[in-house]
Image (cartoon, helix red, strand yellow):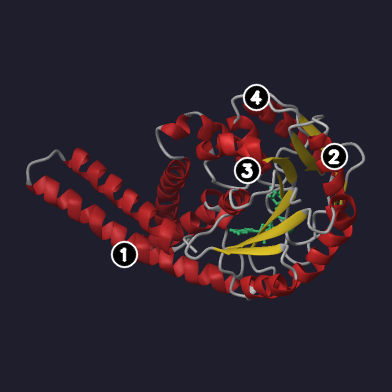
Amino acid sequence: MLKLAIILPTLNERDNLAPLVRRLADALDGPLGADGWEAIFVDDNSQDGTAEEARTLSCTDSRVRVIQRIGRRGLASAAIEGMMATAAPLLAVMDADHQHDPALLPQMVAALESGEADVCVASRFAPGASMAEWNQPTREKQSELANRIARRLTGVTLTDPMSGYFMLRAATLRVIAPKLSGIGFKILLDILATSDTRLTVREFPLAFAARASGESKLDQAIAFEFLVGLYDKTLGRFIPTRFALFGTIGAMGVVVHLAVLATLFRWMGTSFIVGQISAVIAAMTFNFILNNELTYADKRLKHFGELLVGWGKFCLTCLIGAFANVGVAEALVDRGVHWVVAAMAGIIIGSVWNYALSSRFVWGR
Ligand code: GDD
Ligand code: MN
């Protein structure tokens, strides 16, 4: 009897898959039986052949399933999609890069089946947990702040609300799934904050392994993610969270623009046009980096090549946006609209264009 589905979002994890399936089998075949579980890889069309590798594994092990998404990106939405694609009554979400230890899965199953908990969370900060490469003083400050904000949002005290490793009943998820935003890495927090009934959480101390390569910037962004979560649950209804972030960063870009222009043109004595061109490039680059780190943290471009292409596409998008901006303002002024109103209209049209296009063109896949 199928009891548990393990959802594994993947982005360029090809070489991690086969060892991971072996580790899952080692942990689960005993307690659940060989046909008591399935592993669902939700791959966002990785360029390294992750989906092909998953299909290859699936040919010899029917417990391995694959969802390959094309033209879409994002950890949270991949997790939701995977969770909605199984008949198993219990759902776990886990990273596919071996940072999460499958040995916790049977304990989580037991806690859910006994009714002791509604949600099981593997915590990097619960007593007994450990983490490869972690710095003590910052850690305490962060988890304290994280705790306070998470409690406000969810009414639940968690030591690690950002954890990407958790388990819950499918029945619990299905009730709230339509209300989940699917933005960012904060899927667990989103689930807890969205539920109308107070969910009982039990934490399991996790020995968080080091990633094979690269690093998680999320630990530094933890407080920020909470603020985003807070916004998403309140004002996010009126102005979408991503657009608000994009707009805020855009406004900061204006400050960067003026600062660079002032430095070059006023103080260093360059010509105005050289100052302007430099300022535009600086502001676009600033906006690209911040949007990549914050607005699209869940779809972050990481590798140098990706970043370069993304930056180029972003600049192209903004240039067209600038033409639309100027064109609209011009047309309105010609029709006798006050210049401030015309300029504002141009800015709004340009921003919406930049946002709509870059969300697909730059961070869409
Ligand atoms: N399908 C899909 N789409 N999978 C993704 C995407 C995406 O856009 N981005 C990342 N993944 C997959 C990775 O392949 C990996 O299996 C897992 O999601 C986690 O991604 P990492 O890039 O390894 O994230 P991390 O280690 O920085 O972050 C982990 O810790 C955070 C807390 O600090 C994750 O567990 C997060 O969920 C967690 O919030
Ligand atoms: Mn990881």
On the image, numbered disc 3 is attached to which residue?
187
User: Callout 4: 10 Å neighbours few (<14), some, many (20+)?
Assistant: few
Between the C-alphas of marks 2 and 3, the distance is 23 Å
> Where in the figure is residue 215, as x and y percent of width and height?
73, 59
Q: Position of residue 207 (x, y in %)?
A: 88, 50
| Contact? badges 2 and 3 (CB < 8 Å) | no
Assign a secondary structure to mark 2.
helix
Label 4: state its secondary structure.
Answer: helix
Label 3 neighbourhood size at 10 Å, few (<14), some (14-19), many (20+)?
many
Q: Quadrant of ligand 2?
A: bottom right
Q: Does the beta carbon at disc 2 come under 8 Å from ligand 1?
A: no
Q: Is residue 70 above or below residue 298?
A: below
Within 8 Å of ligand 1, the CB of disc 4? no
Q: Residue at x 58, y 31 (%)?
A: 194
Identify residue for label 4.
152
Q: Which residue is mark 2?
A: 110
Q: Nearer the viewer, mark 1 or mark 3?
A: 3
Query: Which quadrant of the figure has residue 307?
Result: bottom right
Q: In the image, is 61 to the left or to the right of 49?
A: right
Q: Foreground residue, 165 or 226?
A: 165
